Image: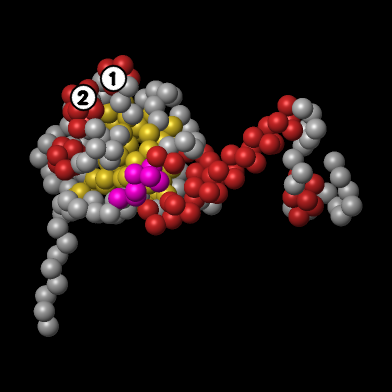
């Protein structure tokens, strides 16, 4: 029996969601994409932008680190391509920052689209002034170690969501939504329809043509709140 070759800790090459899909997806709010994806794919609300003006879209480059150690984030930056979004499974640890101003400056120079960390960062004022999209679970002035190995471009769990390298990632003031790479193209027409429907609903509210949603009575009957034939 032949022995199988173990998967390397660092995977350099992977299939990314296409630039065309990224460009189209960038026009949609993270909430729209989460809705059309079945109200799933949104990371836990603890992971938020350092500034509400920060937004991004791009393919995921996945990183797994040990809590408080950022060695593999430096490795990720070394192999990243312009437009990549670095997603870091930092295990939710907030005892030390995994990134700060210097690494953010390096990301900008490399053309990295954004960084999303389930962990802490620091130098938040400088990063906000730089305008680099940084999403994190918190802040801490402590610096990290750089001595523990991890993995690059393996599937990770971040903010309660499973992410594979190359998946579509979109972030804005509301948070971050991830859509599987092979499903991303199919979500875009649905997102367009969702935007049209929501704009129509807002218009109806503003014009006072329909102040209550058309589905409300039916949902209340189905839930047993009101009886058949009864309305609010």
Q: Is residue 120 above or below residue 79?
A: above
Which corner quadrant of the image does residue 195 belong to? Answer: top right
The magenta stretch is: 16-22
Residue 19 position in % (x across, y down): 34, 44
Identify the residue position indicated by label 2 in the image: 105
Please tell me which of labels 2 and 1 falls first in the chain: 2
Q: Nearer the viewer, residue 169 or 231?
A: 169
The residue carrying pointer 1 sits among few (fewer than 14), some (14 to 19) or many (20 or more) residues within 10 Å by Cα, namely few
Quarter of the image with the C terminus is top right
Taking the image as shown, residue 34 lies to the left or right of residue 134, namely right
Q: Nearer the viewer, residue 192 or 14?
A: 192
Please tell me whether residue 19 belongs to the stretch shown in magenta: yes
Q: Label 2: state its secondary structure.
A: helix
Residue 169 position in % (x across, y down): 38, 43
Q: Label 1: state its secondary structure.
A: helix
Identify the residue position indicated by label 1 in the image: 130
User: In the displayed image of the protein, which residue is found farthest to the bottom?
Assistant: 1
Residue 99 position in % (x across, y down): 23, 30
Q: Residue at x 44, y 41 (%)?
A: 24
Per the model, the C-alpha gap separating discs 2 and 1 is: 8 Å
Please tell me whether residue 75 belongs to the stretch shown in magenta: no
């Amino acid at each position: 029996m032949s022995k199988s070759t173990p998967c390397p800790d660092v995977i350099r090459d992977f299939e990314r969601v296409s630039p065309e899909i990224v460009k189209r997806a960038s026009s949609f709010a993270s909430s729209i994409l989460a809705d059309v994806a079945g109200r799933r794919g949104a990371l836990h609300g603890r992971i938020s932008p350092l500034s509400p003006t920060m937004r991004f879209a791009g393919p995921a480059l996945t990183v797994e680190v040990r809590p408080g150690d950022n060695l593999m984030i430096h490795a990720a930056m070394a192999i990243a391509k312009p437009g990549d979004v670095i997603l870091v499974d930092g295990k939710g640890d907030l005892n030390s920052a995994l990134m700060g101003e210097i690494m953010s400056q390096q990301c900008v120079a490399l053309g990295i689209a954004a960084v999303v960390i389930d962990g802490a960062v620091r130098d938040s004022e400088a990063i906000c002034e730089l305008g680099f999209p940084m999403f994190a679970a918190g802040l801490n002035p402590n610096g990290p170690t750089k001595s523990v190995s991890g993995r690059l471009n393996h599937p990770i769990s971040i903010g309660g969501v499973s992410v594979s390298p190359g998946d579509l990632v979109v972030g804005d003031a509301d948070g971050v939504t991830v859509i599987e790479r092979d499903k991303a193209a199919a979500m875009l027409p649905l997102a367009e329809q969702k935007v049209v429907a929501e704009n129509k609903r807002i218009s109806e509210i503003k014009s006072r043509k329909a102040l209550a949603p058309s589905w409300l009575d039916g949902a209340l009957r189905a839930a047993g709140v009101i009886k058949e034939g009864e309305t609010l």
